[in-house]
Amino acid sequence: MVDVGIGILAVAAFAAGFVDAVVGGGGLIQIPAIFSVMLGTAPATLLGTNKLASVFGTSAAAVNYARRTPVAWSTVAPAAATAFLFSLVGAWTVTRIPPDFLRGLLPFVLLAVAIYTFRRKDLGSVHAPLHSGTKEKVMAVLVGASIGFYDGFFGPGTGSFLVFLFVRSFGFDFLSASAAAKVVNVATNIAAIIIFGFKGHLIWQLGLMMAVLQIAGSILGTRLALKHGSGFVRRLFLVVVGILILKTGYDAWLK
């Protein structure tokens, strides 16, 4: 039974790495898997172990994207730095305030994102940055602060929200937005690992084993995204957001 459980987690980690590398949302696969296999383990420990595995896959994707496609560092760097700080704040806040109100609101926010993306057929098809200079940095800080706090406080769909915001708010195409999202997501994951590690909520052996599979899935996902371009990323984005709507809606209203 242990071997079966490890096999399930290995497959889930690989699939999560693949999906996360393209559009984010790998937690949809990995978190339910780790909760179903590791029964009796504290939820905080499972979430911390999930983050430990995820940061390796996301980092591998960020490196691969940076090698093959330009990363808009003037936008990404301030967003990532701010996201790191606010993820720490969000993780601390969730120890004081339960995120129940976000649980009910999230499916409707995701539905609005999906409808907007589906109706705007040209959204994210062309890389045409909208901002520069001070405005670009201010916008990046605002995005980093909001998404960083959200990821630390609650988390589901963080990668997908980042892709959407880089497309909608900065005029990136879906491929460039996915590359930018990975860098910011690495920052929020590291912040979460610091909090979970400080409180002793990490299973290092399991997390590192899953990290290896995450990296393998991430490499494959990145290669396919770079090969097939923004159209492929957009289609997978809509699929993942659709699944996120169903999953978060079920968790919030039907459980």
Image (cartoon, rainbow, N blue to C red):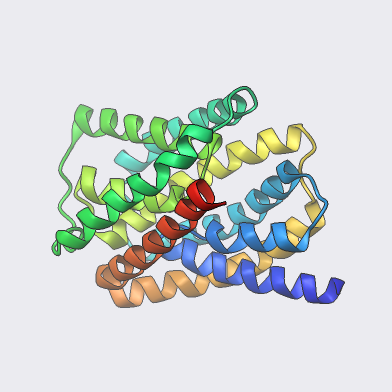
**Which residue corresponds to the image point at 48% horizontal and 66% vertical from the top-left?**
19
Horizontal and vertical percent for residue 16?
A: 55, 65
* Residue 22 seen by the camera: yes
Q: Quadrant of the N terminus?
A: bottom right
Above or below for 222 versus 94: below
| Residue 124 drawn above or below residue 93 | below
At x 49%, y 75%, the residue is 220
Instruction: Please tell me which residue is depicted at 34% across the width and 77% down the height of the picture.
Output: 227
Residue reaching furthest to the top: 96
Q: Residue furthest front?
A: 254
x and y percentages locating residue 70 in the rendered image: 31, 57
Q: Position of residue 4 (x, y in %)?
A: 79, 76
Along the viewing direction, whichever of 212 and 234 lies nearer the viewer: 234
Q: Horizontal placement of 30 versus 6: left or right?
A: left
- Asked if 215 appears above or below 167 in the picture, the reply is below
* 118 to the left or right of 23: left
